[in-house]
Image (tube, coloured by chain):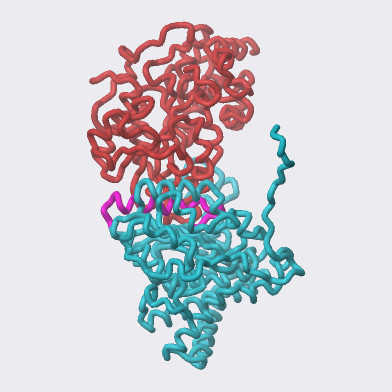
Amino acid sequence: MTDNAVPLRLHIPQPVARPGDASRFDYLSFVPGAAVQRPEFDTPEPELREFPYGLIRVIGEDNAAWDPGLDPEMMRSGLRAMLQTRLFEDRMFRAHRQGKTSFFMKSTGEEAIGVAQSLALAPGDMCFPTYRVQGWLIARDYPLEDMINQIYSNEKDPLKGRQLPILYSARDYGFYSLSGNVGSRFGHAVGWAMASAYKGACHIALGYIGEGTTAEGDFHEALTFASVYRAPAILVITNNQWAISSFAGIAGAEQTTFAAKALAYGLPGLRVDGNDFLAVWAATKWAADRARANLGATVIEFVTYRVAGHSTSDDPTKYRPADEPSHWPLGDPIERLKVHLIDVGEWSEERHAQLESELTETLRAAQRAAEAIGTLGKSKPSVAEMFEGVFKELDWRAIEQRREIGI
Amino acid sequence: MATMTMIQALNSALDVKLGDDPDTLIFGQDVGYFGGVFRVTDGLQKKHGMQRCFDAPISEGGIIATAIGMGAYGLRPVPEIQFADYILPAFDQLVSEAARLRYRSNGEFWAPITVRSPYGGGIFGGQTHSQSPEAIFAHITGLKTVIPSNPFDAKGLLIAAIEDDDPVIFLEPKRLYNGPFDGRHDQALKTWAGDPTAEVPEGHYTVPLGKAAIVRQGSEATILAYGTMVHVAKAGIADSGVDAELIDLRSIVPLDVDTIVASVTKTGRCVILHEASRFGGFGGELAALVQERCFWALKSPIERVAGWDTPYPHAFEWDYFPGPGRLAKALKRTMENH
């Protein structure tokens, strides 16, 4: 033992505020001016190493370099899909409270990510989603009624009652099958991207993982494979500050940024304002251009905030200040895009109110149609479906067991 | 017809598939330039190119996740896990993803992957190079588990597995890689030369998954075995003097229950032989099936001969290993009781 030995202490990270404390976000450090200029997409990774520590923002910033210069019509499409997503989720959350489904999760405050990326990527690209990017489907006009049928597990559920609500699969919309295991599809995105490269195709993969899930081996395995084989993939970390009740520090955010985890793999890492529709788009486009040029994967951390609870089973006021969402410094993605469109003369409060009314009516109609089929427990696919699709062909177990229950 | 070892037969299967299907590719630790630590992929990279057979990081979870993604794209990857003992880091990918992808997506996505992995004991590999994990895969609905016992089957089953649209765990009994194990560890290893099952066609053929082989006809008892234990069973039958019917299951999922039931109904006795630990092993499922379907034909209790319920012990390998002596005793017991 050395003479100056002192008892060691175990560090347990704690968030800056708990219920009853004043809400604070001063732990989020953004280096002023860092990583503002948009580099060419083929810039070598060693020249991009400030980007994981900065924050790419467009709306409200004097940051023309990253402005994707979107056509106003496209911005309005994005606004529409984000708004529809929020209205949809509010309605489905209420449906859960009314006992029409067993479970639901909202992406409130994070709508820009799924929506902008859905619109920015091409048909034929494949998204390997988390449960908070259903905006991807809405942006691509996936039928709302089918989404609700899945949530209600009713007779017309596209997944035949086999999956928890919101764990969609929609191949034709570039949306890979969701699983309840967090992170387990991150590597599938890399494998899919490698297959695209192997086949000489031009499609890229987009993988999502939450900031808490970066602690899983899947994350590190996926980054290793993406780096080693230069997979044409965009690997997104949605840092919404909370993994159920564990704050981002429990996943390592006290030590570095999530985008900076890319550095150890020799991958470019971009840290982006995830509540800025234009910044999400711009970063996605940059990474997509890089992937399509055979330059490999990019890691993007979207800094955002989970306004709602983790799921319908969760009460966030038990572990964070109740007013924390209103103190989030990067604003609301829908409001920010709306104001931006109004500022550039392409939108108005009246048109917005009218849009909201139209979307609400569309949603009502879809919900009515789904409820006519039935809600959870009132309607379900044929029980014979329970035995289908385990293997490509039914084996004797399925045949015998189906017979055992009389079907 | 050429005589091949099991290693050569497996290599030939992979060579055939790389040759006839551009969507088939192989990757795993050391499989590329070096040709695999057991040489199963020897020469394949040189013949078919870097893109078709390449090395992977030491990351079993990453290998299987990547393979699933490739499978979802439309390829037929054949990843190798260097030892089945190391498959556990990839277990979540196999259980939660590969096995369920078709089901949960209502057929929108599936994972036509074939995970090759050497398994089993008898080579002084200690705890981490000797395990037989087949039961844990058999329990996972959505995975197929295939285990060959000779070179002819190894090639035909592997080609069938690669061409199958469901995920297959293909366990290769490494005790049999270079020659048929005669069940007697204190004797020199035989070579495959002269064994009819080592006559392996050069080209494409399949042995269907889910069809057991009756290795030896018999009238007094039925032995259910697979992999290395098929060879142990042959020795045990010879030692026992019992006219036993020997069934090589070849795959435990899908399971050829009809052949099992027909045989046990005929013989009235059943001895189950496997290398894995007995408690909760696949023998339990086999015993339950036989009991359910053949109870009134049974003349004596079903016997299980299996590895002991300890981790695979290095110095005690041949004490742990269910050899022909233990099988012969079980066979005699099943005859003596009734």
Magenta stretch contains residue B182: no
Position of residue A165 measured from the top left corner of the image (x, y, whole percent): 57, 63
Horizontal relation, residue A296 to residue B136: left or right? left
Question: Could one spot residue A135 in this view of the protein?
Answer: no
Q: Nearer the viewer, residue A100 or A188?
A: A188
- Please give the name of the residue rendered at 46% of the width and 13% of the height, measured from the top-left corner: B234
Residue range of the region highlighted in magenta in the rendering: A178-201
Q: Colour of chain A?
A: cyan
Seen from the viewer's position, the closer of residues A204 and A143 is A204
Name the quadrant of the C terminus of chain B: top right
Q: Where is residue A326 shown, x and y percent of the image?
A: 64, 76
How many marks the image carries: the answer is 0
- Image position of B6 with respect to A49: above or below: above
Chain B drawing hue: red
In the displayed structure image, the side of residue A131 where residue B251 appears, left or right? left
Up-down: is A232 above or below B136? below
- Residue A254 in the image: x percent, y percent? 60, 57
The residue under the point 45% across, 31% down is B251
Point 23% across, 20% down: residue:
B1
Residue at (62, 62) in percent of width and height: A242
Q: Does residue B50 appear anywhere in the picture? A: yes
